Every structure is written in C-alpha cells, then in structure tokens.
Image (cartoon, grey):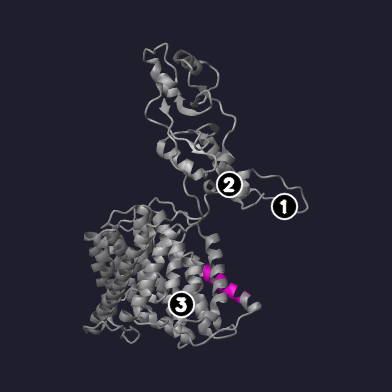
C-alpha cells in the first residue's frame, strides 16, 4: 500500500514543449554545420582525385567528366577493381558503408540511439570516393548525408546528451552536408522534416536550420556560390498545362515504382549467390564497366548530364541511351552493396524521361526535364515538398514552383498507393524494422484528464480495519485491482491493491491496524483534471501503475480516476475518427465521442 505522492507543481502548458536548452543545441549545431561543409569539401575533392587518377592518370582535384573517355578494356577493369576495394573495406572495416547512406542514417536514428562510429565517418566518404571515382553511377548526396550525420553524432557523443538531442545534431550534420553539396538549404531542412527527424518540433528544427544556415554561409569559400545548375529556359504553365504537369508526375511515379521494384529483385538475386557478399560489389562493377562501353556518360555522378538536360544540349538518342544504360548499371551496382548515393541518378532518370516527354509538349524541354527530375525525386524518396524546393534552389527558377509542386505531388501519390515502402525504407524493413513515415498529433495531447476520467469512483476509507479490508478483496464480488484511500474529508492519502492484500495474508495483521496505518513511504502518483492526458499517461508508464486518482490541486480531494482502460478508449475513438465516414448534409449525422471529435479537429 502506498502513501499519496502528488504530481508536483502543475506543468506550464503551451503550444510547444521546447525549453531554453535548445540554445545549447543551436550553438552545437553551428559547429556541426561547419563540420558538414568540411566533410562535403573532403568528399568532393576525394571523388575528383580518384577520378583523375583512375581515368586520366593525373593528380588533381579538378572535377572531370567521363564523356571523353575512350571505351576500352580499362573501362571494364576499373569499376571491377573499385568494387573489390569497397568489398574489402566493408568486410574488414564496417559493413555500414554499404548502400546509399540514407537508410543507414535512418536506422541509426530510430534503432541506434543516433550513435555512429568513427569508422563510418572515415570509411563512408573514402569508399564512396572509390566507388564514384572508378565509374560507379552514383551521387555524392547519400554519402555526405551519412558522413555529415556521423560528424554530428560523434560531436554529440562528446557531451552528455539525450538520444533525441543526439538525433538533432546527427540530422543537423547530414543536412549541412547536403546544403554544401547542392547549395539548397531550404530543401535540406525539408528533407530533415520529411525523412530524418521523424518529428516536427522546435527543439530539433531550430538547430537544423542553424546548421544549414552556417553551411550555406561557408559554402562560397570552399565550394562556390550560386545555383548548381542555372536553368536558361522557362515554362509558362497555366490551366491545362498544370494537368500536363500532373501527367508528367504520374509517369515519373510509375518509373520510380518500376526502378524500385527491379532494385530489390536484384538484391534478392545477389542474396541467392553462393559467394560472400564481399565480392558482390566487384560483380556490380563488372556491370558498370560493360555499360560504360556502351555509353561512357552513364558512369560516375553525371552532373554534366544534368546540366546538358536542363540546357537541352543533347539529342534524343543520347538521352534515351543514357536513361537505359544508367538505369541498368545503377540498379545492378546498388543492389550489389557498393557505396554511393541515389539522388543524382534519380535526377538523371527523371530528367531524361521528362526531356523526352518535352519533345511532344509545349515549352522548353529543359524545363520539362527539371519537372521530371523533381517528380522522380519526390516519388522515389516520398518527399514531394523537398523535391519541389530542391529543384527551385538547384536552378534558381522560382517561376516553376507550382508546376514542380503539382508534378512531385502526383508522383508521390502514385508511389504511396503503388508501393508499401520506399527505396529508403525497404532495406530497413528487410532487416526486421518497420517504419511509419506518417506524422499526426497525439490524441493524448489534445485531451485534458477531466474529459476522460471516471467521476463516480469506488473508494475505501482510511479508517477501515485490516480484517475488513482483507475480507473486502476476498469475496467473489467483482473488484478492481486497486482503490483510492480517502480520509473523512475525501482527501486521497494512498492506494491499496490486491497485491497488498496477498502480502498481508502471509503476515499476522494487528487487529487495531487500519488502512491508514499501513501506508508506506513508496508513494503512488496522482493527476489533475486540467493537465493533458499525455502527462498523466507518461507518469503511469514510468511508475507501472494502471489506476490513478485525480485530485484537486492543493486540497488533494478526490474528483475522479483514470485507468488504462480509459486510455485505450481514447485510442479506440481516435481510430474511429480516422475510419468512421459520415455525410454532413442530406442525412442525420450521428454524434462522435469527444475524443474522436478532438482527433478529427471538430470544435463541438
């Protein structure tokens, strides 16, 4: 049996739970943002260095295109050797460097308490430089998200922080790296919200914004300034033209679904091979090399291809060949477990298809290529807002924002309806972890305890004798597991449970003892009618109790009681608000329970 313990002072209620500690995270995020820029600079220069060494036999960090490389036996051998190096690094270094980086970052956030190892921070950019530099058809954004995230995580681990705070700094580093690579701070923040944070709270959003702001401020000194791919043409879209944009988005969504399905089919193929996974990247490299013999521009990152698509400096034959060859070698290479990002290839896939569609649509083909790029990104990564803003910041053309939003929204709708999981989460799901990427307000936050508590409460008096209490619980009549103990003026002084009765049966009770005499120092919890249900539910979960008396603040007089059953009822009525379909006009509308009304956003 327990003495009463109050919930302490009433919590300060407001729209947000953020406290001044966020300022500490802001200061840390500024440091992490600078680290993200440095990580991006190292990664891009490492890729350029490996590219020049492998293909041009020069020591230089100047960005080079493989468009002029002559197809020969070395074009096949180089990706294979790169795959061998990556396989050895993964086998004897860290297996987490395999893949395109974003699923690994999500996994660290949701499963690993946002803790990354120093090995990942070093080996991920190194392996990506080897992979892309030897011809791998990947981008640098996945590796920099993983690398920037590792920088933020390692920095956070130097201080006494919670898992949620480490997550904030991990995401701050990841988005700072993406901002540095592409010069897209707004899209990077949206990427954090849509993909990485799994929440929308000032506690995490403000530090992420800080890191991206620091990154974009430092970027001109290391990586240059201005849009990465300025768009020369434009597109005047209105009326039926917006419907055409939606059509381009739908096609991109179907394209995304096809590529995602084929990718995991090939992953299954590699998983069935009777050889160690360490050698898979070499097989993927063989496919890359053979594809390079057909179309050299399908190799490596392909930023020059993106620029040519937007400027329309390509022919239909070139575009079709790049689309087919790069799609095949990207699927095979990524499924083999090599290291590299998916964003740049997705932009090329969507851009090629959009450019080809633009041959039959009014307006500039480069603008249609951009719309296809954004739609492909939004549908595949399930991040339509990020994709639309990313395309705008990438080119500096804000006039296309509405067409981009429509196309990305259409592609997003197609892939959400067609595929249970995205290219980012399927890999995690195959490891046994289910991820939900839908946000919603907790109904416990919307309701006050007074709205869900039971007001007619069965209680026991503090002056009840021990024998009488034992007999009360020993009868065949239905009994609750515990009861509030009240004084004569209805003040709650404790709780008595069936467990107490079982213990007392093994003792020799003193006939003169009462329930009040047996109160222990191990006090239970109470709640208040005007506090959010979420606060009370948290205390119930922490203390492991199923029934809590609700009292008046100050007087401690009983006004009600909340049990686990009441909390489950809230959950049930919240689901009812999602599933119950009611016509508001023409038929009589049945009344929903209060919790369902709150969850549905009703005011009555």
Image height of 30 relative to 575, above or below: below
On the image, the x and y values in percent for residue 247 come to 59, 73
Image height of 207 relative to 556, above or below: below
On the image, the x and y values in percent for residue 560 come to 56, 33
Q: Which of marks 2 and 1 is nearer the N terminus?
A: 2
Between 476 and 66, which is closer to the camera in this rendering?
476
**Start-end of magenta stretch:** 243-253
The answer to whether 276 appears left or right of 591 in the picture is: left
Marks 2/3: CA–CA distance:
39 Å
The answer to whether 597 appears left or right of 390 in the picture is: right
Between 356 and 185, which is closer to the camera in this rendering?
185
Seen at 29% across and 69% down, the residue is 35
Q: How crowded is mark 3: few (under 14 residues within 10 Å), some or many (20 or more)?
A: many
Quarter of the rendering occupied by the N terminus: top left
Q: Name the residue under label 2.
A: 575
Q: Is mark 3 on a helix, strand or loop?
A: helix
Q: Which of marks 2 and 3 is nearer the N terminus?
A: 3
Quarter of image, res 343: bottom left
Q: Are marks 2 and 3 in contact (CB under 8 Å)?
A: no
On the image, the x and y values in percent for residue 70 come to 31, 86
Seen at 61% across and 46% down, the residue is 596
Q: How crowded is mark 2: few (under 14 residues within 10 Å), some or many (20 or more)?
A: some
Marks 3/1: CA–CA distance:
43 Å
Image height of 131 relative to 64, above or below: above
Residue 583 — which label? 1
Residue 251 highlighted magenta (yes or no): yes
Q: Name the residue under label 3.
A: 393
Residue 445 highlighted magenta (yes or no): no
Overall secondary structure of the magenta section: helix
Q: Earlier in the sequence, mark 3 or mark 1?
A: 3
């Amino acid at each position: 049996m327990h003495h009463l313990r109050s919930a302490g002072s009433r919590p300060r209620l407001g729209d947000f739970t953020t406290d001044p500690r966020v300022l500490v995270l802001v200061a840390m995020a500024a440091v992490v943002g600078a680290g993200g820029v440095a990580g991006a600079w190292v990664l891009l220069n490492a890729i350029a260095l490996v590219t020049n060494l492998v293909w041009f036999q020069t020591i230089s960090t100047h960005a080079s295109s493989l468009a002029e490389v002559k197809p020969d036996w070395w074009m096949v051998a180089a990706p294979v050797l790169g795959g061998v190096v990556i396989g050895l690094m993964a086998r004897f270094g860290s297996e987490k460097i395999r893949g395109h980086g974003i699923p690994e970052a999500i996994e660290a956030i949701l499963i690993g308490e946002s803790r990354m190892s120093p090995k990942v921070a070093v080996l991920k950019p190194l392996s990506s430089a080897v992979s892309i530099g030897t011809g791998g058809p990947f981008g640098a954004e996945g590796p920099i998200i993983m690398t920037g995230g590792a920088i933020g995580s390692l920095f956070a681990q130097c201080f006494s922080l919670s898992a949620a705070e480490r997550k904030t700094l991990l995401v701050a580093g990841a988005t700072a790296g993406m901002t540095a690579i592409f010069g897209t701070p707004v899209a990077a923040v949206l990427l954090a919200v849509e993909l990485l944070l799994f929440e929308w709270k000032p506690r995490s959003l403000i530090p992420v914004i800080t890191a991206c702001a620091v990154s974009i401020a430092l970027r001109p000194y290391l990586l240059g300034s201005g849009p990465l791919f300025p768009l020369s043409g434009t597109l005047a879209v209105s009326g039926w033209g917006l419907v055409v944009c939606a059509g381009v988005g739908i096609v991109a969504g179907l394209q995304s679904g096809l590529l995602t399905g084929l990718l995991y089919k090939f992953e299954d193929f590699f998983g069935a091979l009777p050889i160690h996974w360490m050698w898979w990247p070499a097989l993927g490299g063989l496919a890359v090399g053979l594809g390079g013999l057909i179309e050299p521009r399908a190799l490596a990152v392909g930023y020059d291809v993106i620029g040519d698509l937007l400027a329309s400096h390509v022919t239909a034959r070139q575009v079709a060949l790049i689309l087919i060859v790069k799609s095949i070698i990207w699927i095979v290479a990524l499924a083999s477990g090599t290291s590299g990002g998916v964003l740049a290839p997705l932009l090329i896939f969507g851009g090629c298809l959009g450019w080809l569609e633009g041959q039959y649509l009014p307006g500039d083909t480069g603008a249609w290529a951009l719309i296809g790029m954004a739609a492909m990104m939004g549908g595949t990564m399930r991040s339509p807002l990020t994709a639309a803003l990313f395309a705008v910041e990438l080119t500096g053309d804000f006039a296309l924002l509405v067409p981009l939003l429509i196309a990305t929204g259409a592609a997003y709708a197609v892939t959400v309806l067609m595929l249970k999981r995205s290219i980012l989460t399927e890999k995690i799901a195959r490891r046994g972890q289910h991820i939900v990427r839908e946000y919603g307000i907790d109904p416990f936050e919307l309701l006050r305890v007074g709205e869900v508590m039971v007001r007619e409460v069965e209680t026991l008096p503090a002056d009840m004798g021990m024998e009488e209490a034992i007999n009360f619980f020993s009868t065949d009549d239905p009994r609750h597991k515990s009861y509030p103990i009240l004084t004569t003026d209805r003040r709650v002084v404790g709780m008595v449970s069936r467990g107490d009765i079982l213990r007392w049966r093994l003792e020799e009770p003193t006939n003169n003892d009462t329930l009040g005499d047996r109160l222990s120092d191990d006090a239970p919890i109470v709640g208040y009618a005007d506090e959010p249900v979420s606060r009370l539910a948290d205390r119930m979960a922490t203390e492991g109790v199923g029934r809590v008396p609700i009292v008046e603040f100050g007087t401690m007089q009983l006004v009600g009681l909340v049990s686990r059953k009441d909390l489950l009822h809230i959950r049930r009525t919240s689901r009812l608000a999602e599933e119950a379909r009611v016509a508001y006009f023409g038929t009589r509308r049945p009344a929903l329970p209060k919790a369902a009304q709150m969850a549905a956003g009703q005011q009555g």
